[in-house]
Image (tube, rainbow, N blue to C red):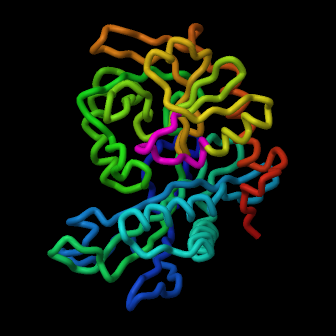
Amino acid sequence: MKEIDWSNLSFGYMKTDYNVRCYYRDGKWGELELCSEETLNIHMAATCLHYGQEAFEGLKAYRGKDGKIRIFRPEANAERLQSTCRGILMPELPTETFCEAVKKVVKANERFIPPYESGASLYIRPLLIGTGAQVGVHPAKEYLFVVFVTPVGPYFKGGFATNPYVIIRQFDRAAPLGTGTYKVGGNYAASLRANKMAHDAGYASEFYLDAKEKKYIDECGAANFFGIKDNTYITPLSTSILPSITNRSLMQLAEDMGLKVERRPIPEEELTTFEEAGACGTAAVISPIERIDDLENHKSYVIAKDGKPGPVSEKLYTKLRAIQYGDEPDPYGWVTVLD
């Protein structure tokens, strides 16, 4: 393998040595299999291809200063995948099997885990698809669970720096009682046009309002939103938002720091009152928001007046990263340290 330039990795796919697979047949999950093949051989009538019976997760592994490998909150990802399975009628993968598959694939690809302080990490992508052939709209009888990994750099090129966002009203990411709370590919397909519009206009990402009334803040592209004001961490409460594990972790850390935490509907006008705001998720951890433009109504909500990340966002980001890398104690048992 040629030398990897760890500090200049993009957030993209790089071939690694192995992936882990597990098949669901005859009403039960099989054994975990280590595989070096990158492609899947599936039936052309598989439900994942026609009816979107597909779910995925995203998490990361980090190499600490002590050389140890840490995986962040795999149990929480397993639980979220189970929730998605219930939502689109796929068999639930037991938490134990999920975590074992994640550990197995990370160990098998240990040489691809970036060194400490390189700014890079190992991205882990679990995927569950309906492979059984159906022409009628029904759940499949057979499924495949795959976990692959790839080393990645920061999601945004500038790393922890403020970014501009733009409100897009022409498209909705998900309906209030649709699949927004599940991590299914269809939600991301629904966001592609809005995302391209935002990028073409020079923004980091699109910003969605609620699909029903277009009055309340929903999500920042593929990430959750949070705002800081009056010593309070505020994040939207909605039936169309994916419950972010990063956001859940930040809420806990915010409480630990003495901030009040509120989950509630946030009207668009409230953006004028935030001292800080950010988009949060596995890929970027926190992407601080510089401003949110509402081009349709000729408004611009400038949040980072000096263009820099705010002190609370910086503190939360630093704290979460310190736990992920093992630089600080992990009081909640979030991190799985590999033997």
| Residue 108 shows in the view | no
Question: Where is residue 338 drawn, in percent x and y?
Answer: 73, 66
Residue closest to the eye, 242 or 309? 242
Residue at (58, 68) in percent of width and height: 102
Q: Is residue 28 magenta?
A: no
Quadrant housing residue 310? top right
Magenta residue span: 236-247
Eyeballing the image, is 267 above or below 211?
Answer: above
Residue at (30, 11) in percent of width and height: 297
State left or right for residue 184 relative to residue 58: left
Principal secondary structure, stretch drawn in magenta: loop
* Residue at the farthest left position: 135
State left or right for residue 316 relative to residue 112: right
Q: Is residue 240 magenta?
A: yes
Residue closest to the eye, 306 or 36? 306
Question: Where is residue 18 drawn, in percent x and y?
Answer: 50, 71
Eyeballing the image, is 119 above or below 104?
Answer: above
> Where's the C terminus, which quadrant?
bottom right
Question: Where is residue 160 drawn, in percent x and y?
Answer: 60, 29
Quadrant housing residue 37? bottom left
State left or right for residue 262 relative to residue 67: left
Residue at (22, 80) in percent of width and height: 133
Residue closest to the eye, 131 or 40? 131
Quadrant housing residue 246? top right
State left or right for residue 297 relative to residue 34: left
